[in-house]
């Protein structure tokens, strides 16, 4: 899933995870003996199993045999590239096929490289290292495109992409999903009083506080625009989201950021919460309506969609 793009989660190459896919366990063992001391190795013995492992564990690289029963490597690779959740995982074919037409089929399926059997250890090690480096560089570029330059949390573009992907995941697993839209109360007055540089510092503090409050790996905090933030909470119902919203209110209050023009005397937030198991629901609109209600009721509170 796309949340792995967080810069703080960028791993060094020795910690990379490689999925080896081959219907013959002895071939998997050969590759493990070559790469097992350098990388974390996962295994699958069929195409469908490989796709399931990719969705569950998001390996950094896949080494896959071409000739497998039922679903061959070419078909599996094409299915991976058609699935936005795992399309960015590079695939290297490890194959005994030698015809030019067979090599062309590997490229056409979406592979980044192929290695001939029997495997040369040095060739395998160097090809794997090269493609892992390229993937990390691509991940870094995607991270830079999706991170808000001021606060360091994700931006609206990534939020929309991530929400779409997580709705699909929750639908597949029949789990609820929730979002929160969070607004800093009377932030224009704060900027007018202290100036925009101090205002930027406050935005950074609030963003980090919200991020620290949502600690599950799949939870995501993004800057929605201006002084608004949004939080995506997979596998979370309205009760769980409301509990987190209450924690966020307390956490922001505990920052004790002075706000002389606010009724509370310090920076506070208002939160709109919406959760659903109806995966066609416009969660963003529902949460925004609840945010408006929270402001109407006096701010420094959360409201939850019924």
Image (cartoon, rainbow, N blue to C red):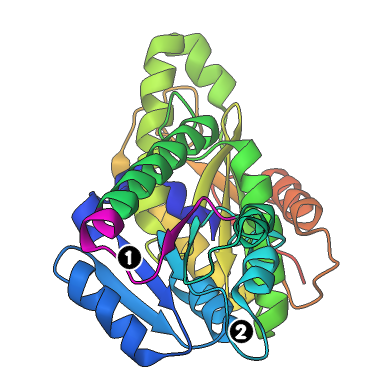
Magenta span covers which residues? 111-125
> How far separated are the C-alphas under marks 1 and 2?
19 Å
- Quarter placement of the N terminus: bottom right
Q: Is residue 98 above or below residue 13?
A: below
State yes or no: discs 1 and 2 in contact (Cβ < 8 Å): no
Determine crowd level at label 1: few under 14, some 14-19, many 20+ residues with C-alpha closer than 10 A: many
**Residue 121 is a magenta residue:** yes
Work out which quarter of the rendered image holds the C terminus and state it: bottom right
Query: How many labels were placed on the picture?
Result: 2
Q: Which mark is residue 17?
A: 1
How crowded pointer 2 is (Cα within 10 Å; few <14, some 14-19, many 20+) is rated as some
Coordinates of residue 171 in the picture (x, y in percent): 72, 77
User: Residue 19 sits in which quadrant?
Assistant: bottom left
Q: Position of residue 288 (x, y in %)?
A: 75, 48
Q: Hey, which residue is sitting farthest front in the picture?
A: 99
Residue matched to label 2:
48
Indicate the position of residue 183 as horizontal and vertical percent values: 59, 39
Residue 65 is a magenta residue: no
Q: Which mark is residue 190?
A: none
**Looking at the image, residue 216 lies above or below residue 266:** below
Residue furthest right as drawn: 280
Give coordinates of residue 31: x percent, y percent: 28, 74
């Amino acid at each position: 899933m796309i949340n792995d793009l967080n810069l703080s989660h960028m791993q060094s190459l020795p910690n990379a995870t490689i999925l080896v896919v081959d219907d013959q366990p002895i071939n998997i063992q050969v590759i493990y003996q070559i790469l097992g001391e350098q990388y974390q190795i996962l295994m699958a013995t069929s195409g469908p199993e490989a796709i399931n492992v990719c969705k569950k564990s998001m390996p950094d690289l896949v080494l896959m045999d071409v000739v497998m029963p039922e679903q061959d490597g070419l078909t599996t690779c094409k299915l991976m590239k058609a699935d936005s959740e795992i399309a960015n995982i590079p695939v290297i074919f490890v194959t005994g096929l030698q015809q030019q037409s067979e090599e062309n089929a590997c490229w056409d399926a979406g592979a980044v490289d192929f290695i001939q059997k029997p495997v040369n250890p040095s060739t395998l090690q160097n090809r794997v290292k090269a493609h892992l480096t390229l993937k990390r560089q691509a991940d870094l570029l995607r991270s830079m495109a999706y991170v808000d330059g001021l606060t360091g949390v994700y931006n609206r573009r990534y939020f929309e992409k991530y929400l779409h992907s997580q709705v699909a995941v929750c639908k597949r697993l029949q789990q609820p999903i929730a979002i929160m839209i969070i607004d800093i109360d009377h932030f224009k007055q704060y900027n007018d009083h202290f100036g925009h540089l101090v205002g930027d510092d406050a935005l950074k503090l609030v963003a980090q506080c919200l991020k620290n409050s949502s600690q599950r790996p799949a939870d995501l905090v993004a800057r929605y625009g201006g002084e608004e933030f949004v939080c995506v909470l997979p596998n979370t119902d309205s009760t769980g989201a409301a509990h987190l919203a209450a924690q966020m209110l307390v956490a922001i209050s505990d920052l004790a950021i002075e706000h002389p023009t606010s009724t509370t005397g310090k920076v506070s937030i208002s939160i709109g919460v919406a959760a659903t198991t109806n995966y066609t629901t416009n969660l963003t609109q529902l949460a925004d309506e609840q945010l408006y209600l929270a402001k109407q009721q006096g701010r420094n509170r959360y409201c939850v969609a019924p």
